[in-house]
Amino acid sequence: MLAGRDLLGAAQTGTGKTAGFTLPLLQRLAAGATPSRRAIRALVITPTRELAAQVQESIRTYGKHLPLRSTAVFGGVGIQPQIAELKRGVDILVATPGRLLDHAQQRTVDLRFVETLVLDEADRMLDMGFIPDVRRILKLLPAKRQNLLFSATFPDQVRELASTFLKNAATVEVARRNTPAELVAQIAHPVDHARKRELLAHLVKSNDWRQVLVFTRTKHGANRLADQLAREGIDSDAIHGNKSQNARTRALKRFKDNELRVLVATDIAARGLDIVELPHVVNFDLPHVAEDYVHRIGRTGRAGSSGEAVSLVSHEERPLFAAIERLIQRRIEQRAVPGFEPGSPSASREQQPAHHRQHGHRPEHRQRQGFRQEQKRSTAPARPAQSRPQRPSSRQRPPVLLGGLRRD
C-alpha cells in the first residue's frame, strides 16, 4: 500500500483488516496533506451503515494527531448535516453506495481528486446487489488511482470481477481461503424447525449466556424472535434494514454496553462489526450463501479472544449445512441437546410458561368449548327473519376509500 500498488487483501474475520488499510492510508495522505485546500483524497465504501460508522471511528482514532479530516455519509439519517460537513472539507470519506450517489446527484460531493479507493467487505460490494451502484461510483473517480479490496471471503466470481479494475495488483492472503478464525469453537445442534425458538431460550437460560448475537434470515423473523424471547423474560431487541437508523444505533449500543442480553439481527450485522469480546453467536437460520456463515461467526473470536458459534440446524437446512462444511473444508461437530432431539415431543405442560397453560392453549378444552358452542347454536330458537336487517350485497355497497385507493 505504501508503494501505491493495488491490493487484494484476504484475512480471517477479526484479525485487523481495518487497521491493515487505515494505517498506511493515513501515512500516505499525511505526507502530502494541505489543510488549506482540502479535497477528498481517499474514499472508503462499505456495505452497511453500521460498518461505515465503525470504520470512520477507527480512522479518527488512528489519525488523532494527524492534520487529516474524515467523515462518514450513509442513509437513514438527515442529509443536511452531511452536506455541511462536506462543505467544510474532508480528506477521507467513508460512505455507503446509496447515500454517496445521493450526494453526487445533488453535487454536494467532489470525487475528482480521489487518490485511493477502498472497498471494505469487497465480496459483498461486488455482488449483484451492489455492483450497479459501484460501477456508477467508479465512473465518478479519476482513472488513475490506487484500488484496495479487503474481505474475509473472496469467491472466484468476485475475484474475476475485481480483476477488471485492479491494475498489477498484489494479493495478500493471511490464511487459507474462506476460513473462519481458529479461536471460534463451532458446534451444530440438530433440532426440528418448530422447536428452534424453544431450544434457543433453553440454551440462553441454562448456560446463563449474557451476550448473544443471533442471526435470522428475514426481517420479520428477527422481530418475531426478539418479541418471543422478551416474553420469556430474556431481554432482547432486533436490528435489520426496516428499522430506523436511530433504533439500529440505539440497539447496537445497548448490546455493546451489555445492557441487552440478546440481539437478533439479519445479515446487516454480519459484516465487519467489532463487538469487544462477544462470547456467543447463534445461527438461528442458516444463511443461503455459505460465505455469509464465515462473516456471521466472525463477530466472535476477534482480536485474539475466544468465542463460540452455535448453529441450530433443522432437517430442511441439511443441504445448507453441507455447503458450509465444504466451504470451510472442515467438519462441524453435531451434538443433539437432550430433550430437543429431532422428532422428540415438545416441552411438557409443566415446563411451559404460565400463559401457555391457560385453558385457551389446551386443545382438548378448545374441542369441548367448540362442542358446547355448537350445541347452543343448535338448541337456540330461530330469530324471526324480519328482525334481521338486510345487509346490501357487495355490489350494492358504496365504494370505500383506503389511503386514496378505491375499493369496490
Image: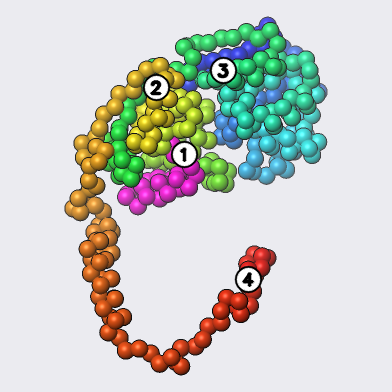
Cα separation, mark 1 vs mark 3, equals 24 Å
**First-in-chain label (1 vs 3):** 3
Task: For the N terminus, give its image quadrant.
Answer: top right
Q: Which residue lies under the disc numbered 1?
A: 217
Name the residue carrying label 4: 408
Cα separation between marks 4 and 1: 37 Å
Other-residue count near label 2 (Cα within 10 Å), few / some / many at <14 / 14–19 / ≥20:
few
Q: Is residue 238 magenta?
A: yes
Judge by depth and name the residue closer to the eye, 79 or 268: 268
Looking at the rendering, the stretch of residues picked out in magenta corresponds to: 213-239
The residue depicted at 61 percent of the width and 76 percent of the height is 395
Q: Mark 1 or 2, which is nearer the eye?
A: 2
Comes first in the chain, label 1 or label 2: 1
The type of colouring in the image is: rainbow
Q: Position of residue 260 (x, y in %)?
A: 40, 42
Q: Earlier in the sequence, mark 3 or mark 2?
A: 3
In the rendered structure, find residue 156 and report the number of the disc placed on it: 3
Residue drawn at 20 percent across, 50 percent down = 348
Q: Amino acid at mark 3?
A: Asp
Q: Residues within 10 Å of mark 3 (few under 14, many from 20)?
A: few
Q: CA distance from mark 3 to mark 2?
A: 18 Å
Q: Nearer the viewer, mark 3 or mark 4?
A: 4
Residue type at mark 2 is Glu
Seen at 24% across and 35% down, the residue is 337
Q: Is residue 152 magenta?
A: no
Q: Is residue 51 above or below residue 349?
A: above
